[in-house]
């Protein structure tokens, strides 16, 4: 804990994008537009899947959960980020800081596990098409959608407990736009090895191992696609998983760059840009990847808007 003469801070100061202070107004409106698009797109996905009976199948149920995780991830960070950007820095309380990190972990790990469930679903659909309906039953689909939320909620409090035991007396300045793992550790004035070990264990269990399962699934998928005799059959099979594969790359790329190698090379400026990729850009492009290229989603959207127009103009 802190020394007797040291004061433990109850609030911290987020610097945000101080490197671009001269562009803060432009950056604010750009981030605001991105956030509004993210909320609109993902809320539309959730509404379509929930209201359209034809979309009550495993792939779209997982997509709805991915949209919810995207909404949690960006809504947990962006409002404060907008305030930080507009003001050129702002204060955040210790409780709000740790709460922000807690929900950030839930959203991040939930995305990882949902993407793994989606990869498993594509594996069954392509490698075992004749047995898909008998294998992907409602109970299995429910578990694959439920546990990606439940597991992080149950496991992350252990890391938060160790963070709560640390003393924060050195500095109250966070050179980031939200309370992330590395900036929190940099403020600690006590040993951090327990928190680092706990975070490493959770990352292995909830991010690295799911990533390995995704890779194994796609190795099996690519082998199955190669064995398809017709070119049209191969193209159709690959098109069913291309959107998910793109989402996996967009999600894991920045995470690996930041969290698997947090010490050394990366400067705070580089970390901010990489973090923006999966907290803003990935939630923005996920609905586009799955929605704009998917005929079922387009059809459901058309039906929804047609019904609304009929209600408005009877």
Image: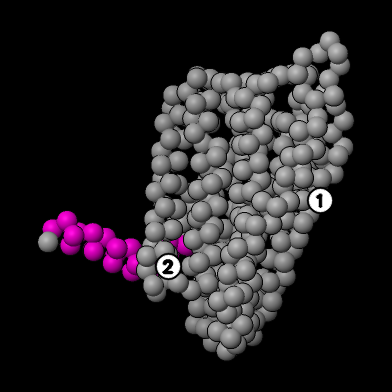
Q: Quadrant of residue 293?
A: bottom left
Considering depth in this image, is 143 or 54 the residue closer to the camera? Answer: 143
The quadrant of the rendering that contains the N terminus is top right
Above/below status of 230 relative to 164: below
Which residue occupies 85% across, 44% down? 197
Q: Give the percent coordinates (x, y) of residue 158.
A: 77, 45
Above/below status of 202 relative to 11: below
Which residue occupies 48% across, 67% down? 60
Q: Which residue is mark 2?
A: 294
Looking at the rendering, the stretch of residues picked out in magenta corresponds to 290-313
Q: Quadrant of residue 292?
A: bottom left
Q: Give the percent coordinates (x, y) of residue 166.
A: 81, 30
Q: Give the percent coordinates (x, y) of residue 90.
A: 56, 21
Q: Is residue 309 magenta?
A: yes
Q: Which residue is mark 1?
A: 201
The quadrant of the rendering that contains the C terminus is bottom left
Q: Is residue 157 magenta?
A: no
**Residue 23 seen in the figure:** no
Q: Main secondary structure of the magenta part?
A: helix
Q: Give the percent coordinates (x, y) of residue 259.
A: 73, 44
Above/below status of 257 relative to 136: above
Which residue occupies 50% across, 48% down? 71
């Amino acid at each position: 804990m802190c020394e007797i003469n040291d004061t433990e801070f109850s609030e911290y100061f987020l610097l945000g994008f101080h490197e671009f202070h001269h562009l803060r107004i432009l950056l604010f409106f750009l981030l605001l537009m991105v956030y509004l698009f993210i909320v609109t797109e993902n809320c539309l996905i959730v509404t379509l899947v929930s209201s359209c009976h034809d979309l009550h199948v495993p792939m779209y149920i997982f997509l709805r959960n991915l949209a919810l995780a995207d909404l949690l991830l960006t809504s947990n960070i962006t409002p404060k980020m907008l305030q930080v950007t507009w003001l050129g820095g702002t204060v955040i309380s210790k409780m709000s800081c740790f709460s922000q990190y807690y929900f950030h972990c839930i959203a991040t790990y939930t995305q990882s596990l949902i993407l793994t469930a989606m990869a498993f679903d594509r594996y069954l659909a392509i490698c075992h098409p004749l047995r898909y309906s008998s294998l992907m039953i409602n109970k299995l689909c429910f578990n694959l959608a439920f546990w990606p939320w439940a597991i992080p909620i149950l496991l992350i409090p252990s890391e938060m407990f160790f963070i709560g035991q640390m003393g924060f007396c050195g500095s109250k300045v966070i050179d980031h736009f939200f309370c992330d793992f590395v900036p929190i550790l940099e403020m600690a004035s006590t040993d951090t090895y327990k928190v680092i070990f706990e975070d490493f264990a959770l990352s292995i269990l909830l991010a690295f191992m799911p990533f390995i399962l995704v890779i194994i699934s796609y190795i099996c998928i690519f082998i199955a696609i190669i064995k398809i005799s017709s070119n049209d059959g191969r193209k159709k099979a690959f098109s069913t998983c291309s959107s998910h594969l793109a989402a996996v790359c967009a999600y894991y790329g920045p995470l690996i760059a930041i969290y698997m190698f947090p010490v050394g090379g990366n400067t705070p400026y580089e970390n901010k840009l990489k973090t923006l990729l999966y907290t803003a850009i990935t939630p923005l492009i996920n609905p586009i990847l799955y929605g704009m290229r998917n005929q079922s989603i387009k059809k459901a959207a058309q039906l929804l808007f047609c019904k609304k127009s009929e209600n408005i103009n009877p």
